């Protein structure tokens, strides 16, 4: 996927492009590891989507009942061990356009391909630099209330563990979705028994959700740090261009353009990806 082929438009597409960056970084990180295979499973952020209406047109079947994670990760040996027709479905799904993927998806999910995955990833990003923060409060990785039961539904159907991967400018964290489940009810009641976990309104998007403080929640682990920093870019015509930026005292990016987001960068893992399982 070319990071320059981002969805173009207003606030919707800005958020979408940030998600595309997180997925791209995770995919490239996995591809550098021996013995792993991964593909983008949820709505592909590389599609030329300008508006939310266009996204709605390519939503997958059953999207109201379950949320498909962004990326599926396999042990390469396990993937090669799948029946030939299952592997072919995955390959066709990867290569297809939105309409083709929508038509392939039901058969793909009836095959053995999905539940053979080692882990599933929810890719999230935030326009913060943790190392630039001058406050002690930790940043968070969120699961929106509207997504929580739908992720559970998908996980229950395929029995593949889900992990939330939250990427910042300088590092990334990984948290098992099961940890959110274990403490969700008590957090909603205002009585979480673990530090760094609460239910509250998520800043910027102003939706309620579960918030895990990446530096305080006991189940949060450092996924890796960026050995090559991302660029800060904005949409420009049919591509992107770098823009000027600085960091606030809270570590938040302050750029010349509200639409600025991250592109590129190379994440160096703390340990092999599947060991987090």
Image (tube, grey):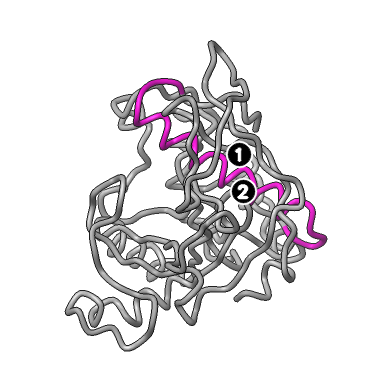
Q: Position of residue 136 (x, y in %)?
A: 46, 68
N-terminal label among 1 and 2: 2
Residue appearing at x 56%, y 51% in the figure: 129
Q: Using the image as rendered, state which of residue 90 and residue 121 is in the foreground.
A: 121
The residue range painted magenta reads: 8-36
Residue appearing at x 62%, y 57% in the figure: 171
Q: Residue 174 magenta-drawn? A: no
Q: Using the image as rendered, state which of residue 136 and residue 19 is in the foreground.
A: 136
Callouts 1 and 2 close, C-beta under 8 Å: yes
Evaluate whether residue 109 shows in this view: no
For mark 1, does the 10 Å Cα neighbourhood hold few (<14), some (14 to 19), or many (20 or more) residues? Answer: some
Residue appearing at x 35%, y 66% in the figure: 211
**Secondary structure beneath label 1:** helix
The residue carrying mark 2 is 39
Q: Residue 33 magenta-drawn? A: yes
Q: Distance between the residues labelled 1 and 2?
A: 7 Å
Tell me the quarter of the picture where residue 236 sits.
top right
Evaluate whether residue 277 shows in this view: yes
Q: Where is residue 145 in the image (x, y as percent from the top left)?
A: 25, 60
Q: Using the image as rendered, state which of residue 123 and residue 252 is in the foreground.
A: 252
Which residue is outermost to the top? 237
- Report the quarter where the C terminus lies: bottom right
Residue 203 vs residue 78: left or right? left
Residue appearing at x 49%, y 72% in the figure: 176
The residue carrying mark 1 is 94
**Secondary structure beneath label 2:** strand
For mark 2, does the 10 Å Cα neighbourhood hold few (<14), some (14 to 19), or many (20 or more) residues? Answer: some
Q: Position of residue 170 (x, y in %)?
A: 63, 53
């Amino acid at each position: 996927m070319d990071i320059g082929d981002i969805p173009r438009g207003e606030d919707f597409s800005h958020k979408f492009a940030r998600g595309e960056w997180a997925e791209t970084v995770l995919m490239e990180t996995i591809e550098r590891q021996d013995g792993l295979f991964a593909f983008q499973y949820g709505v592909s952020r590389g599609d030329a989507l300008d508006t939310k209406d266009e996204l709605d047109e390519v939503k997958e079947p059953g999207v109201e009942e379950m949320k498909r994670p962004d990326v599926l990760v396999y042990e390469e040996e396990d993937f090669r061990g799948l029946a030939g027709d299952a592997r072919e479905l995955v390959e066709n799904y990867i290569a297809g356009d939105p309409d083709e993927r929508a038509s392939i998806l039901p058969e793909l999910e009836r095959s053995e391909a999905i539940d053979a995955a080692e882990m599933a990833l929810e890719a999230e990003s935030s326009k913060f630099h943790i190392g630039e923060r001058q406050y002690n409060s930790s940043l968070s990785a969120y699961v929106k209330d509207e997504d929580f039961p739908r992720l559970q539904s998908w996980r229950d159907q395929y029995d593949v563990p889900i992990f939330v991967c939250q990427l910042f400018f300088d590092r990334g964290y990984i948290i098992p979705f099961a940890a959110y489940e274990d403490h969700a009810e008590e957090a909603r009641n205002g009585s979480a028994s673990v530090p760094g976990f609460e239910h509250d309104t998520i800043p910027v998007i102003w939706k309620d959700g579960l918030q895990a403080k990446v530096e305080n929640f006991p189940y949060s682990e450092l996924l890796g740090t960026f050995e090559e920093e991302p660029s800060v870019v904005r949409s420009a015509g049919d591509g992107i261009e770098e823009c000027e930026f600085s960091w606030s005292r809270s570590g938040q990016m302050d750029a010349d353009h509200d639409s600025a987001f991250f592109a590129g960068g190379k994440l160096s893992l703390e340990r092999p990806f599947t060991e987090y399982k």
